């Protein structure tokens, strides 16, 4: 059970921090300066730390005050949204929604499925970013994200829904295999031109190998070409440059129409897991819950066809 005392003084604190003085905050809150000062003093006493550095000339936030302001601003914003939701319960999802997607998977697989959802809910204003770096969903104000891979343990502030694992296959173009032969074992890959993905630091990402029911192994081939773009990998392998390992969600059409040929099927392997993620504090918002449910259904079957 949360004590109501925890909320006392937060409004006054945020008002003082934003206004820059007790007098200006008091005017904004329609209180006396003395009342605002006492509210801040009680809050500091309860927290056991100073939130402001006071001098005769200015009022500044301490480091603790800056950190507390960030949390309080988010809490008050979420309370305001909660009131809006209760006032419009059952209404269409509306308002601004921030979405973060992996660059290639987001563009190729999520966006074509996202647009019908946005057409269906014209009251939504979607702000969509595409990043492959680690994104702290809560700190960066993301409402809903799609993540490839993830921590062993998700933070308690983050809710997540499992979408499935990638399936990775080795592949090459028909012209490359006609010119260089088709390898039928991992050892036979050695003399072939390897195309691999570049990690953010520029080093080559290893291929994932599984032998039967054994554990997943990482193999670092002698790469002929290292690319920091999965789509560039597809272009390179389709042009006959060499052999690579890619997820089926990325090359499904190429395999279907014959531009690429899957090889070494005995070494098809499970890749990284995928999740839809969202801040737990926002899951009751209609815009968040509607999008989470929609993506869970819309992306089913796209990850490992």
Image: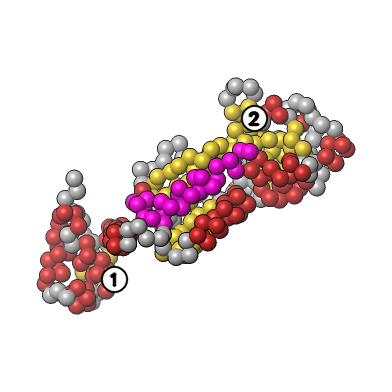
Q: Find out whether residue 85 is within the magenta segment.
A: no
Pointer 2: what residue?
A: 209
Q: Position of residue 133 (x, y in %)?
A: 53, 51
Q: Is residue 163 above or below residue 103?
A: above
Name the quadrant of the N terminus.
Answer: top left
Residue at 75% across / 32% down in the picture? 263
Magenta part of the chain: 281-305
Q: Residue at x 73, y 29 (%)?
A: 264
Label 2 sits on a secondary structure element that is strand
Image location of residue 127, percent across then percent down: 49, 62
Horizontally, is 224 left or right of 19 in the view? right
Cα distance in 3D space between marks 1 and 2:
55 Å
Q: Is residue 302 magenta?
A: yes
Q: Secondary structure at mark 1?
A: helix
Residue 240 percent across, percent down from the top left: 81, 44
Closer to the camera in the image, 66 or 96 = 96
């Amino acid at each position: 059970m949360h004590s109501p005392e925890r909320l006392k003084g937060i409004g006054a604190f945020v008002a003082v921090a934003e206004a820059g003085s007790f007098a200006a905050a008091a005017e904004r809150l329609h209180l006396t300066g003395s009342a605002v000062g006492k509210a801040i003093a009680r809050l500091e006493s309860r927290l056991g730390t100073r939130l402001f550095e006071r001098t005769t000339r200015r009022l500044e936030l301490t480091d603790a005050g800056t950190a507390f302001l960030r949390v309080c601003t988010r809490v008050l914003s979420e309370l305001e949204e909660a009131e809006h939701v209760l006032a419009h319960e059952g209404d269409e999802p509306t308002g601004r929604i921030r979405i973060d997607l992996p660059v290639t998977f987001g563009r190729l697989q999520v966006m074509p499925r996202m647009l019908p959802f946005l057409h269906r809910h014209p009251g939504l204003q979607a702000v969509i970013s595409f990043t492959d770096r680690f994104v702290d969903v809560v700190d960066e104000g993301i409402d809903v994200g799609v993540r490839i891979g993830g921590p062993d343990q998700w933070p308690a502030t983050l809710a997540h829904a499992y979408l499935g694992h990638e399936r990775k296959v080795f592949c090459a173009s028909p012209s490359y295999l006609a010119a260089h032969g088709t390898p039928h074992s991992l050892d036979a890959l050695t003399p072939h031109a390897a195309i691999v993905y570049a990690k953010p630091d520029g080093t080559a990402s290893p291929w994932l190998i599984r032998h039967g029911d054994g554990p997943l192994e990482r193999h670092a081939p002698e790469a002929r070409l290292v690319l920091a773009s999965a789509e560039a990998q597809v272009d390179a392998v389709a042009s006959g440059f060499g052999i690579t390992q890619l997820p089926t969600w990325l090359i499904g059409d190429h395999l279907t129409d014959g531009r690429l040929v899957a090889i070494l099927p005995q070494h098809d392997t499970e890749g990284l897991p995928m999740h839809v993620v969202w801040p737990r504090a926002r899951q009751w918002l209609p815009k968040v819950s509607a999008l989470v449910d929609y993506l869970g259904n819309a992306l089913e079957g796209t990850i490992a066809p």
